[in-house]
Amino acid sequence: MQTDIHSVPNADADHPISVRYTDAALDMGSVSVPRIFLWFYPYLRGWNGDQLDPREAFFLQYVLNEQTGPESPTFRLKTLPCPFTFDTRKRYTTKCRNMGLFYTKAHYKSDVSRGVRRGQPPIRRVEYVEWFFDPLFYSLSLIYQKWRTERDARKQQFGKQRIFYRLPDDYIQPVEIPPGLIDLVARSRAAPDDVRRAIKARPGVADQLMALVNRPAPGRLQDKGFYRVSPLIILRAHQLLEQRNPNSPPPKF
């Protein structure tokens, strides 16, 4: 029986596989930042009037790069590999949150060891925190729609298939709220502390917003699964809910 020299037995079919390129640049892996972010982030304005400067946008790129797929591993802000001090990272994160670029939800796990040791029921500790960036990309998509409409109009005007177009430097797009986030606020899913901050910022809507705090909700904060949302975004959601039917009384949520 002759051996086929062109046939190699598949001896590794049942083992974990690690791919190497033997090249430092390739072995470090590659990431992709959405072009819509790179092109249009300068036009964003938070409802507090803030905007991202290039350093803050650069930091945000590092955060976005950690999303590698549906099963992306978690990371810690303190050990994120980026050229900013921990204090700077916390400051940039606070600014992005206050601008309304993302909102968060904490996931908890039971600490059984404490309950066994002290004879008390297990307490729940934060396991990880989800950061939801749909307000950022929803707002960027609105800028894209504006850019594409203006670009196509100029293509038709000049009779060209390809044309370079840039939005005016003074163009502004407020950070807007995707419908899903409006519904979260309407269903009393925003954290009560954030709602109270919104009331303090705008007492005129206190009666409507207090429904978000006083609505019966048995259990602790983590048991209900509240979302931490910028108070300015809560106020914007309230405004949009009123605009859905301007003839109706103020929403009771």
Image (spheres, helix red, strand yellow):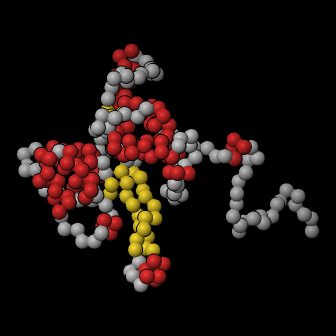
Outermost residue, right direction? 1
From the top left corner, tell me how far across and down residue 109 is, in percent: 43, 70
From the top left corner, tell me how far across and down residue 172 is, in percent: 32, 29
* Residue 151 placement: quadrant: top left
Lateral position of residue 198 relative to residue 205, left or right: right
* Residue 19 placement: quadrant: bottom right
* Residue at point 75%, 65% (across, down): 12
Outermost residue, front direction? 118
State whether residue 110 is above or below residue 34. Answer: below
From the top left corner, tell me how far across and down residue 83 is, in percent: 56, 40
Residue nearer the viewer, 205 or 243: 205
From the top left corner, tell me how far across and down residue 55 is, in percent: 48, 34
Lateral position of residue 75 relative to residue 93, left or right: right
Q: How many marks?
A: 0
State whether residue 166 is above or below residue 24. Answer: above
* Residue at point 40%, 71% (across, down): 124
Lateral position of residue 197 relative to residue 247, left or right: right
* Residue at point 43%, 58% (across, down): 129
- Evaluate whether residue 32 shows in this view: no
- Evaluate whether residue 86 shows in this view: yes
Residue nearer the viewer, 91 or 242: 91
* Residue at point 30%, 69% (across, down): 220
State whether residue 1 is above or below residue 233. Answer: below
Outermost residue, bottom direction? 119
Lateral position of residue 68 relative to residue 100, left or right: right
Quadrant of the rendering where the C terminus is positioned? bottom left
Quadrant of the rendering where the N terminus is positioned? bottom right
